[in-house]
Image: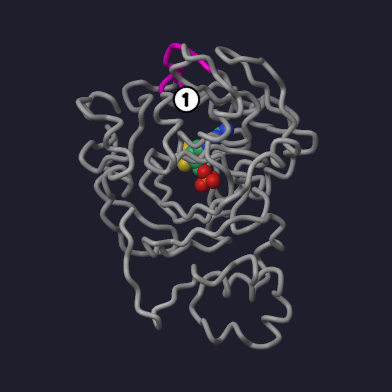
Amino acid sequence: MKIKKKEPWNISENEVTPQELFENRRSFLKLGAASLIAGSSIVEALAKDEIPVANLKYIKDKNIDNLKLNTYDQITSYNNFYEFTTSKEKVKTLSDTLDTNNWKIQIDGLVEKTITLDFDDLLKKFALEERIYRFRCVEGWSMVVPWIGFTLADLIKYLKPLSSAKYIRFETLVDKKMFPDQNRGVLSSISYPYVEGLRMDEAMNDLSLIAVGLYGSSMPKQNGAPIRLVVPWKYGFKSIKSISKISFLDKEPLNTWQKANSREYGFYANVNPNVDHPRWSQAKERVLGKFFKQKTLMFNGYEEEVAHLYKGMDLTRYI
Ligand code: MTE
């Protein structure tokens, strides 16, 4: 990524360490220090007491692209999580039934050992880092999120897949008590478990993240607690939530949305402003909280990091 030189007076909210702010939130606010960096979304959210106390230790993202974060409230109040509801505004309250205690992740397929991982143990094995990423939904809205997690590449190296593994497949837990819509099937066009996948070289790219939190604290239920995938150069539906199974395969897995409607959704789902969705344009996007639309960037702004993965591929065909 390009390094941008910044003037000393032009300090963005992202250069204020969220963790330090959270840990000292009371004294910080008492001192009235918030006014010194007025306009900062972190400080605004803190003042409204909306962000849970940071419980994760992580290395901070330097945010060299100077992305403006969406607020905690925006990120956690407008969600797609069909296992609960098709209403973006209701996910926040309906996801209360998700119980992340004793969360397990089954590992199988073309791998040295087929094992079941315990989420709490897994968390201790990796150093966490913050990744401030653009996140673009295929529906035309977007946001900027300070995720906390570790690279999928690190997890894959730890799991030791066989050389015959060419793809990785993820599944969300099926539990009709926790995920009421798996029972009712309100959105009957998609079947459960929710499935997603990546080609192995995509999975090993340094941008592919296993996220366990955001804004310094554990992943909110509505955003895919306790552990989800984040692939910032692809449409949001690739970023599968509440992962309970990871499989290594030699063939391309059939992901949920391609299974539901292969004319509209493919396996790759790379953000591409030049290839429209059959029902809407992908040229522009509305950032949550903003009125005017902005231009969508090729590979969601991560062209430098990922374009080489698709060299020679016809991107109008591989949607
Ligand atoms: N994962 C599961 N298991 N179920 C879902 O319905 N929705 C996807 C993706 N991951 C979804 C999912 C879609 S369509 C999007 S846009 C993102 O999650 C939304 O993530 P967010 O709610 O954290 O913004």
Look at the picture and state if 199 lies above or below 1: above
Identify which residue, 57 or 192, lies in the foreground. 57
Position of residue 63 in the picture relative to residue 5 (left or right): right
Residue 251 covered by magenta stretch = yes
Look at the picture and state if 308 lies above or below 301: above
Element under disc 1: strand
Colouring scheme applied when the structure was drawn:
one colour
- What residue is shown at x 57% (from left), y 61% (from top)? 72
Q: Position of residue 237 (x, y in %)?
A: 46, 36
Quarter of the image for residue 11 reads bottom left
- Is residue 183 visible in the rendered image? The answer is no
Position of residue 54 in the picture relative to residue 159 (left or right): right
**Image quarter of the C terminus:** top left
Q: Which residue is mark 1?
A: 197
Residue 284 covered by magenta stretch = no
- What residue is shown at x 44% (from left), y 58% (from top)? 288
Quarter of the image for residue 126 reads top right
Kind of residue at disc 1: Gly
The range drawn in magenta is: 248-259
Q: Position of residue 185 (x, y in %)?
A: 60, 26
Q: Position of residue 81 (x, y in %)?
A: 57, 39
Look at the picture and state if 266 lies above or below 79: above
Identify which residue, 30 or 152, lies in the foreground. 152
Circle 1 crowding by C-alpha within 10 Å: few under 14, some 14–19, many from 20: many
- What residue is shown at x 20% (from left), y 40% (from top)? 274
Q: How many marks?
A: 1
Look at the picture and state if 270 lies above or below 168: below
Residue extending farthest to the right is: 102
